[in-house]
Image (spheres, helix red, strand yellow):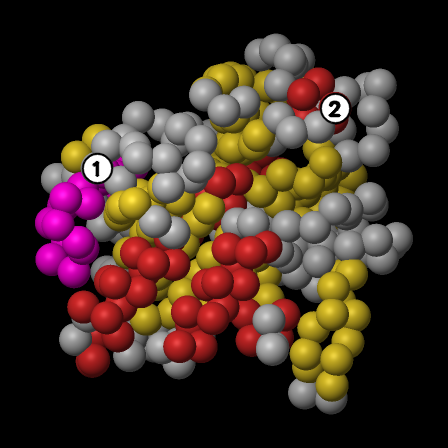
Amino acid sequence: MTRNKSHRGTIFMEEAEILSHQAFEGEQFILRVRAPECAEKALPGSFVHIQCDRSKPLRRPISIMRVSAKAGWVDFLYKAVGEGTRLLSKRKPGEFLSMLGPIGVPFKLNPERPRPLLIGGGVGIPPMIFIAETVANNKIYKPMVILGSEVPFPFKPHPSSILIPEMPEGVIASMPLMDDWHIPNRLASLQGFPGCFEGYVTDLARHWLNALPAEARAEVEIFSCGPHPMLEGVAKLAAEFDLPCQVSLEEFMACGVGGCAGCVVEVETDTGPAMKRVCVDGPVFDSRAVFSS
């Protein structure tokens, strides 16, 4: 019951079967679908455009969290914040979703910067998980992951088994999946969650960067996704330490394939300011281009 139609050779229309749909506190949900075309082509930073319900033809963009090209499944983490995603949250395993993807310019890792610092906030966490899993067994990269949330995390944090000398004392909460992948990671929140850093993700990242030896800091590149104010703070952090930084923007979209120009943002280019479409020219941009001031 799969219907595929390629678009530009990389974007596919699939009738994606819901395999599982888990609910978490804070109206957060993890959705797994069978979508083999998307699973094969998706890269960290890619997203899909989902028809949440047949009564709502306008699709919603959702970032990809994990994929298995071999098994053909794709995972998403989303929050029910409007009518569309609330309807999506009621969908059951065995049902099918019309899905367009993978869409967008992905994050690009640079082996000359082998210490990726991954900073995710709220529903911006999924792309960071995707990058982390991509480099988990790659001997070139030594990632560090910082995740933040102001609602309970969509997983049960636990004390990390991985020692990070550059972390403040008592900051030990981590994402179990990251620990399973042997990736150093810590959590931040202003809600007083046990073991979490009490503050913004940028504050914790700044503490970690300051504690790194200069030669190690020179190997860092920042990757981030989250709310606009958080990304602006991450961009300022990158400028403060003179580090390259890629950010994934979250904008409202209509068509999702560059036709409507409804998601344009101003981006600084070599020839001056230009309007770029987040869906196909992004969602990943150089932080200096979108937060030039």
Q: Amino acid at mark 2?
A: Glu
Q: Which residue is mark 2?
A: 83
Location of the N terminus (image quadrant):
top right
Identify the mark nearer the N-term, 1 or 2: 2
Could you say where residue 189 lies in the image, as x and y percent from the top left?
36, 41
Query: What is the number of the mark on residue 195?
Result: 1
Q: Is residue 178 magenta?
A: yes
Residue stretch rendered in magenta on the structure: 162-181
Which residue is pictured at 63% across the width and 70% down the height?
Answer: 290
Q: Secondary structure at mark 2?
A: helix
Could you say where residue 203 lies in the image, as x and y percent from the top left?
34, 58
Q: Amino acid at mark 1?
A: Gly
Q: Is residue 158 visible?
A: yes
Examine the rendered structure and indicate whether residue 278 appears above or below residue 98. Answer: below
Q: Nearer the viewer, residue 105 or 247?
A: 247
Query: What is the number of the mark on residue 32?
Result: none
Which residue is pictured at 46% across the width and 46% down the height?
Answer: 121
Examine the rendered structure and indicate whether residue 174 appears above or below residue 211. Answer: above
Could you say where residue 276 lies in the image, as x and y percent from the top left?
75, 67
* Label 1 to label 2: alpha-carbon separation: 34 Å
The quarter of the picture where residue 176 lies is top left
Q: Is residue 227 magenta?
A: no
Q: Main secondary structure of the magenta part?
A: loop
Q: Is residue 45 visible?
A: no
